[in-house]
Structures are given as C-alpha cells and as structure tokens.
Image (cartoon, rainbow, N blue to C red):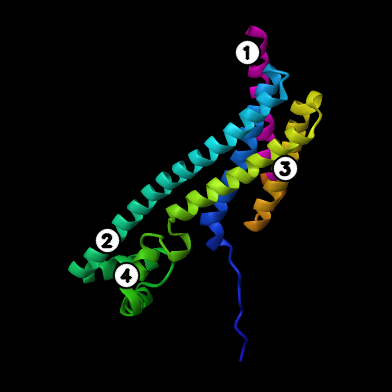
Amino acid sequence: MHALHRETHLIQRIGWLRAAVLGANDGIISTASLMVGVAAASTSTSEVLVAGIAGLVAGAMSMAAGEYVSVSSQADTENADLERERRELAEQPEAEMDELTQIYVERGVEPALARQVAQQMMAKDAFTAHARDELGLSEQVAARPVQAALTSAVTFAVGAALPLAIAILAPPTWTASAVSGGSLVGLAVLGALGARAGGAPVLRPTARVTFWGAFAMAATAGIGSLVGHAV
C-alpha cells in the first residue's frame, strides 16, 4: 500500500500575502519618495521627518480604507453569486446537474463519466461543488475585507518606518541619498521575501519592485528640486 503523498500549496496565502506585499511596498515607496522630494526642495531635516511621519499615518489609514472597500466589494459580489447559485440549486437541480456535467466534459472527462462524477459530487455537497467548479470560489481564496485592511495598514506602517529610521540616523547632508539607497535595498529584500513566501522565482519580482521604487523616488526628487528652486 502506497503512503499518501502530502503536498503543501501556497494558494492559501494569497489573500494576506497580496495585501502584505502591497502594503509594505507602498509604505517604503510612497514614504521614501515623499521624503526625498521634500529633501530635494529643502535642507531642513525636521521638514523631511514631518513629511515622512505624515506620509506614514495618512498612507496607513488610506491603505486600510482602500483595501477594506475594495475587498468588501469583491466579497459582496462573491456572496451574491453564491446566493444565486444556492437558489438555482433549490429551484432547478436537474439543470444544475447538467451544467456541472458539462463543466467536467469541457475539462476532458468522458460524458458518461462526467455525469457520474457530477451526481456523486452533488450527492455529497451540491453547493460546494458548484461554488468551486462553476464559480471558482473556495474557502482558500475567499475575500476577507478586515484581514486585508489590517494587513495593509500594519505592513504599510512597517514599510514606511524604514525610510523614517534612515532619515533619523543619517547625517543631515546625506538624508536624500541615504533614504533613497536604504529604501531601494529594503525594496529588493522585500521583493525577494514576497517571492519566496509565494513560491515564485526571486529575480524578476525583486528587479521589478526595485526599478519602480527608483523611478518613483527619482521623479519626486526632480519635482521637489524644481519646486524648491521656484519658491
């Protein structure tokens, strides 16, 4: 008798992992870009720090609210589809049986066998079978608004704390350069960690997030320099 082959899949992490990576990335990029832009316009370290703190607080609240609203809308759509499916199963079970059978046929199962599979699946748990195979919904990927909001807010704050800490520790004349360089290193590390946590190759996500972070900081530095000279 063969031993059961146990597999560990990472799809269960997708809800919190997406929010965590997005929050931390945004925390580093937006806060560092804001601070670099202010540093390019002013030589005052206190102004740079005030801008960073304001960016951290406002960004964390914005991320939490945005994620909650977005994921709540997704959850509302999922719940509406599930309720419609529950009603159709109660009102027209044969049509739903035919629909599930056709799904399996389209996936490569012989029609007669597909019918048997559909019958057995619906006999065990018709609603779960249709939610999973017809709608593509399951417990592992269900929308969780509160989890997404809290994860985004906390990880944004953690990410934003990096450029703030660098600005506090760096010499005043090196604030912009230190924040930029340190934040890019942080983004690279975060990109690699996020890729590893999701089971994806490391190089491309790391390069992607580092490139866009550098682009954002360069853009705000340029704008800050122009505004600083203009006023």
Q: Nearer the viewer, residue 111 or 23?
A: 23
Read off the magenta span: 206-231
Q: Is residue 217 magenta?
A: yes
What type is the residue that disc 3 sits on?
Gly
Residue 91, x across and y down, in percent: 18, 67
Mark 1 is on which residue type? Val
Element under disc 1: helix
Q: Earlier in the sequence, mark 3 or mark 2?
A: 2
- Relative to 56, is 140 above or below? below
Judge the density around disc 1: few (<14), some (14-19), many (≥20) Cα neighbours within 10 Å.
some
Residue of label 1: 227
Q: Amino acid at mark 2?
A: Glu
Q: Quadrant of residue 106?
A: bottom left
Q: Residue at the location (27% across, 61% down)? A: 83
Amino acid type assigned to the residue bearing label 4 in the image = Phe
Residue bearing the label numbered 3: 186
Q: Nearer the viewer, mark 1 or mark 4?
A: 1
Q: Which residue is mark 2?
A: 83
Return the residue at label 4: 127
Quadrant of image for the N terminus: bottom right
